Structures are given as C-alpha cells and as structure tokens.
Image (cartoon, helix red, strand yellow):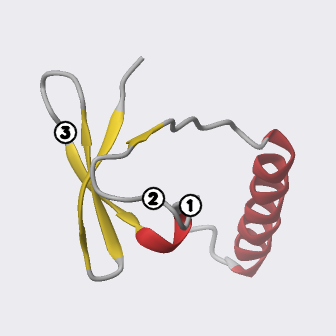
Amino acid sequence: MINYIIDRFENDWAIIETSEDPIITFNFPKNLLPREAKEGDVLNISFTINKEETLKRKNAIQIKLNSLKKQDKGNDISL
C-alpha cells in the first residue's frame, strides 16, 4: 500500500508525495483534508466508483447525443 505524505502547504493547496519510488508529487485542495492535517502527516487515500452516478451521467450524455443527432438533417455529423 502506498503512503501519501503531506510535504507542505502552499496557499490553498497541500503538496502530497508518495512514499515509494518513483516518488510522485501532486497538489490536493487543502479544504478537502481533515482540519487537523499538518505537514508530515501520512494520509490514507482510497477511491471508489459511484456506479449509480456514473450511469446517470452516461444516460444524460446519451440523451444529449441523441438530441444532436436529430438536429443533423444532412446526416453529415458522426457522433
């Protein structure tokens, strides 16, 4: 498991580094971290897929595409 360490804060951003080679550094919004987070703290980060919201977005996009296709009277646009 990769550890994520708060290297420092720059304005509204936390600069996070991974603990393993190659070390990767990235910016993360400070306001999304726990209030007590400070430089040197090791973070647990995990992501999950929200399948319900993903499906909603796919359906909304498909509706928009269908609408665009209906407006293409010359059938010269391929989506």
Q: Nearer the viewer, residue 18 or 75?
A: 18
* Residue 38 vertical position relative to residue 72 in the rendered view, above or below: above
- Residue type at tag 1: Pro
Q: Nearer the viewer, residue 44 or 53?
A: 44
Q: Secondary structure at mark 3?
A: loop
Residues at discs 1 and 2 in contact (Cβ within 8 Å): yes
Q: Is residue 77 visible?
A: no
Pointer 3 or 1: first along the chain: 3
Q: Residue at x 42, y 17 (%)?
A: 1
Disc 1 and disc 2: Cα gap in Å?
A: 5 Å
The amino acid type, in three-letter code, at marker 2 is Ala
Residue beneath disc 2: 37
Callout 2 crowding tier (Cα within 10 Å): few <14, some 14–19, many ≥20: few
Where does label 3 land, which residue?
A: 24
Mark closer to the observer (3, 2): 2
Q: Position of residue 52 (x, y in %)?
A: 87, 46
Q: Quadrant of the C terminus?
A: bottom right
Rate crowding at label 3 as few (under 14), some (14 to 19) or many (20 or more) other CA atoms within 10 Å: few
Residue type of the residue flagged with mark 3: Ile
Q: Residue at x 70, y 38 (%)?
A: 49
- Tag on residue 34? 1
| SS at circle 1 | loop
The disc at residue 62 is none
Q: Residue at x 79, y 74 (%)?
A: 67
